[in-house]
Amino acid sequence: MTFIYDPNDPDVRRDPHAVFRKLRETEPVHWSPKLSGWVVTSYELASEVLTTNGTYSAERFTAVQQHLSEEKRVTAAEVMRWFQHWMVFRDPPDHTRLRRHMANTLNIPVFDARRETVISVVNELLDRIPVGDAFDFFQAFSLWMPGIVVADLLGVERDRLLEVKQWSDDMMTFIGSARGVPDKYERARRGANGMGTYFLDLIAKRRAEPREDALSRLIASEVEGQRLSDDELVGCMMMVLNGGHETTANLLNNSMLALAAHPQTVQHLRQHPDEMAAAVEEFLRYDSPVLSIGRIVTEDTELGDQEIAAGDRVFAMLVGANRDPEVFSDPDELRTSRNPNPHMAFGKGPHFCLGTPLARLEGQIALTAILERFSSIELCEPVESIPWLNSLVTHGPTRLPLRLK
């Protein structure tokens, strides 16, 4: 019987590692009719997909729209007004230009300046956790912490955070949801229009009265004498809000789930907090917050032993690549001192995530603070009952019942 990767299978979403291990061993470039695309699970081949710009294009929406009905194409056009300006979906030279603007705005000094904000938000949220009682870590902590940090960074009002997050979640159903999600295109349209209207209004306010926030810096950014258009500004803001929130939330959730399963690691890191930076890198590798990165093939090519046709979709499965035994010894073991650790949790190549320093900072501060306060992390339900995101892009639980003591 031929094995087929099915991202809609709840067991596969919860634990894709067994599936990806089988694919790496037998068919590292696997055609999935469920995705109408190729699933790449080896580190070497995933790296090839992400670093070969001319053959593997980030501009995959044209191919997506070709498979839609006329009604859905009209809806998709409203969403594409903004997605077309996300640099993660652009190839050079547009990607290069947008990335230079973003690098002017979001860089290591800017992120380092947020350290005290991150510490304050982390402690404020931890103060509310019911010690010794069961609670949902996602709803109590990881939903809020990165959201508040990125909202403050961008200049989004905290009291609008949940509303903006809902728009972002709805918009991402356009590309992130596995097939079978009802009303995904209508949800995406509502989210795109809601967030687009909100950010256009915020841009107008910042033009009139600039502040010390990322949006004001992005408005003022010049590359070769040119500034970004309003639609480009909105696209950049949407991308940062989504990427800066959900990815870090998944990092925190997946890390806590790993710690709950490895109490000896909890005790070790409590005694050696100076090792947290390396531990965060291992959490990123062990259960990566991003499931896959998609590309469109621009010309007939060969990947591994497979012939890939121009126009085909290819998914570099980061969760699979990061457990490739050709690169990582004993890849299914959690080793917080692993060195070297060349994981691809933040991608690879020209699209490597610009927000990586902030995600690392948030992960290190949050997990260090949690282990300073609590010596025990317990999962309150069988791991099999934990629901996971129905997404082709991100990877993490949607509910995480824990008890901290």
Image (cartoon, grey):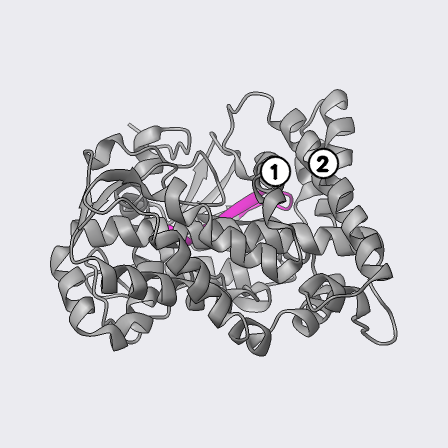
Circle 2: residue type: Gly
Q: Split into 4 quadrants, where in the image is the N terminus? A: top left
Q: Residue at x 41, y 45 (%)?
A: 395
Residue 371 appears in which quarter of the rendering? bottom left
Q: Residue at x 35, y 45 (%)?
A: 27
Q: Nearer the viewer, residue 267 or 299?
A: 267
In the rendered image, which residue does mark 2 sit on?
194
Circle 1: residue type: Glu
Query: Helix or strand or loop: what does disc 2 sit on?
Result: helix
Residue 36 lies in the magenta-colored region: no
Task: Find out whether the residues at labels 1 and 2 contact each other: C-beta distance under 8 Å.
Answer: yes
Q: Nearer the viewer, residue 374 or 173?
A: 374
Q: Position of residue 81 (x, y in %)?
A: 78, 42
* Structural crowding at the residue carrying mark 2, measured as other residues with C-alpha within 10 Å and reported as few (<14), some (14–19) or many (≥20): some
In the rendered image, which residue does mark 1 sit on?
163
Using the image, determine if residue 3 lies above or below residue 223. Answer: above
Q: Which residues are magenta?
A: 308-320
- Distance from label 1 to label 2 (Cα)? 9 Å
